Amino acid sequence: MEKVYSQENKLFTVCKYILFFMVFYLLQKAQINGIINPFSFGIYFALIWCNQNILILSPLYIASSYLNNFILYDLYSAIATCLIMIIIYGVHLKLKKPIKPMYMLLYALISQAVYVFLKIYSGTIWWIVFVELVFGLLYMFACMKVFESLIVRGITRKFTLIQTICLGAFFASLTCGLRAITVFDFDFAKLFLAFVVIFSTLILPILESALLTMVFSAGTLLYDNNAYLVAPIIIWWLVCSCFRGRHKIFAILSLIVTELMCVFYFDFYYTTSFITFLPCIISGVVALCIPKSYYQTLAETYNSSFVNRSLETIINRNRNNIHKRLLKLSQVFGEMDKVFRSMIKGKESENELKSLLVTEIKSKLCASCPEKNRCHKTYGDETNSILINLANIAFEKGRITLLDIPSVLTGRCFKVNQLVYTINDLIEQYKSYASLLGSIDASKVLIGEQLYGVSGVLKDLAKDVGKNVVFDNGLEKEIIDELVYNDIICSDAIVYHENQNVVSCVLEVRKEDSLKSKINSIVSKVCRTKMLVETDESSPHAGWQILNLKTAPKYDIIFGTSAHTKSSSTKSGDTYSIIRIEDGKILMALCDGMGSGEKAERTSQTAISLVENFYKAGFESDIILSSVNKFLSLGSTDVFSCLDMAIIDLKNGSADFIKLGATNGYIKHGDTISVIECNALPLGIISNATPTIKTTMLHSGDMVVICTDGVTDSFASDEEMTDYVNNINSLNPQEVADLLMDKALENNHQTALDDMTIIVAKIFAR
C-alpha cells in the first residue's frame, strides 16, 4: 500500500513540474503589444516563495527562456536570475529564516540586474525595461497570492477578493501567451477561450461568467493591442448564456453556429478557413464529453450563497429539533421533582407519638400481667391518664425515673422497674426513627431540588438552542479579505447572528497565524463590534486552527490574591475559586471551613468544589446554595463553612454578592467605599439557611474586596478595616491584596491567629 502511494506521489510531482514548465514557456511568449514582457520572472519567484523545489524550477525556467526564441542574451539573463536566487535561498535556508514577501520583491529586483544590463546593451529603450520591471514585480505579487491559494491553502478553499483579482491577472497572462502560439492558422487561444465560455456559462452565475469571459479575453487584447478577437468571444458568451439551465448540447451547438457566422458571414478574422473554425469544434467536443455530474458538482462548489443558505436551513432545523427534545426532557425532570416532593412524609405530631407510646406500653408490658383486667378495666381511666403523663415527662426530659412514677401506680403495679425501662427504650427508638425519617425527607428534598435544577438547565439550553442563527455571507468574505490583506491566511469563515447584540464568528486560519493578536481587531473592525477569541481548537485539516470569536463583553476583570495559613497549622481551612462561567460571567468564591487544619481544609474544598461545578453546569444560585447546604448538613452535625461569593456580569457590570456566615465585603469606588454586610448563618448548620444577597452595579475602575474572618478579626473594629481599605492608594488589585494582608499581620505582631485569605477584583472597560 505504501509503495502504491509513493508511486502516485512521484507521478503527481512529475506532472506538477511539467505543468510549471508549460506555464514558464507560455509566459515567456506572453508580451504586451509585442514589445513588453513583464511575466517571465514573476512566476518563477512566486513558486519559490510557495516552497516549490528551487533546484528543479531553475533548470525548467532556464530551458523555457532559451526555447522561447533561442537567443543567448535570454539564456544568460535566465541563468544569472536563477544563480542569484539559489544563493539567496541557500542563505535563508542556512539561517533557518523564511523569506518574507517584501524581501522576495527586493531579491527579484536584484536578480534582474543582468537582464537589465543585457537589454539596454542590446539597444532596448530604457523606459521599456523600466516598465517591464515594475509590471513584473506587480505580476509576481499577483502570482504569490494565486499560488498561495492554489498550493498552500488548497483549491477547494474560498478565494478572497484580492486573490480573485490576482487569479484573473494570472489567467489573462496565460491567454496572452497562448495568443502567441499558432500552427497553420490554428489559434490555441481560441481553443482555450471557447472552452472557458462554454464551461463558465454552465457552472457559474451569469455575472461571474461574464466577468470571467472578459478577464480571459483581456489577454488577447494585451497581446494584439487589437480587439478583433474580443468581439467574437463576447458574442459567444451572449449566445451561450441564452441556453443556461438547458442541456449542455444547446450551448455547445449555439457557440459553433455563432463561430460559423463570425468566420464566413461577418468576416471577423484575417483568414477564413476550416482551420480557423476548428478550435471551437474541438472545445465543444471536449465540453460534451465531460459528465453532467461534474458540472453539477462544480456549480454547487462555486455557488457559495446556495451552500450557505442550505447550511443555514439545515442548522436551524436541527437546532429546532434539539430545542423540542430538550423541552420534553425538562418536563420529565420537572415531573420527577414533583413525585419526590409528594413522597415526603414529614414529622408526625407529638400527640400522635404519645398515643403510640401508650399503646406500645400496653401491648409490651401489660399484656402478660395477671393484674391487667383490674388495672385497665377497674382503674382504666386513671391508669391511662398516668401513662399519658409519663409519656409527656419522657418527651420533655428525654427519659423518666422511678421518682416520676406516682404512688397510686406503684402501690398496685408489680412491674414498675420494667415500666421505666420500657418507656425510656421506646423514647430512644422514637428519637432514632424521627431522625431517620427527617434524613430521608431531607434526602428527598435534596434530590427533588437537583431534579428541578436539571429541569431549569435543560429549559435554558432549549431556549438558547431554539434561537435561529442567521449567516452573514457578506461579512464572511470581507473578513477573509481583510485577514489575507494583513498576511493572515484564512481558508474559511462563518459569521452568524443569534440575536441583535451577539455576533459569533468561526475562522479556520493557518496554525502559525492563530496566535496573532490583530485577529481580534480585524474581525472587530469588519463586524463593527468588539470581538474576542473565546476558544481555539485544532482543525481536521493538518496545519490549520479553528478560532471561535464572540462579541466581547463591555468590561474585563483582573484579580489579586493573598493568603496566609494560621501560624500553628500546616494546612489552611480557606479555599477560593475564580472561574469564568457562561454568558461572560465571572464567579469568585471564598470558603472558610470551621477552624483550621486538614478537616477545615477538606470541608472548605468540598463546599467550593460543589459551588464551582453547580455554577459551571448552569444551575440557579438559590438551588445551588440550598443543595450545597443540605449536602453539608446531612454529612455531619459539626461541619459548617462560611461562604462568600460574587458573580460579576462583564456584559453590563452587574454584580450579585451572596454571603452565608461570611465577613463584610467591600466595593472600592476611587475615594469612596461601599460595605456588603452579611446576616446569614454559615453553610451546614441548618438545612434551610437563607443567604444574604445583594445586587449592585459596578463601574470601570471599581474594586471588589472579599476576605475571611482571619483578616477582619485582626482589626479592632469593622470601621477601622473599612477606613484602611478605603485609604489604600493603589490601582493594582494585587498590590491592594498584599497591603491589606501586611496590615492584618502587623496588627497581630506578624502572627496569623487564623487562616487568612483575600481576593481583590478590579473591573475595567475594554
Image: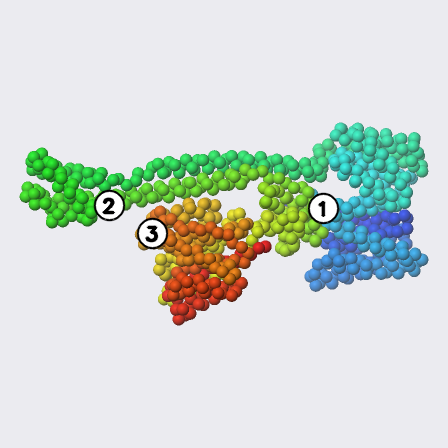
Label 3 residue SS: loop
Alpha carbon distance from label 1 to label 2? 79 Å
Q: Quadrant of residue 132?
A: bottom right
Q: Which mark is residue 685?
A: 3
Q: Which residue is mark 1?
A: 160
Location of residue 629 in the rendering, given as x and y in whole percent from the top left corner: 37, 49
What's the image's color scheme? rainbow
Location of residue 668 in the rendering, given as x and y in whole percent from the top left corner: 49, 59
Q: Is residue 405 above or below residue 297?
A: below
Residue type marked 3: Ile
Q: Is residue 146 above or below residue 297?
A: below
Label 1 residue SS: loop
Alpha carbon distance from label 3 to label 2? 20 Å
Residue type marked 1: Thr
Residue located at (92% from left, 56% from top): 124
Which one is earlier in the sequence, the residue at label 3 or at label 2? 2
Say if residue 283 shows up in the picture.
no
For residue 307, side relative to residue 429 (left or right)? right
Location of residue 295 in the rendering, given as x and y in whole percent from the top left corner: 73, 34
Which one is earlier in the sequence, the residue at label 1 or at label 3? 1
Label 2 residue SS: helix
Q: Which residue is mark 2?
A: 431
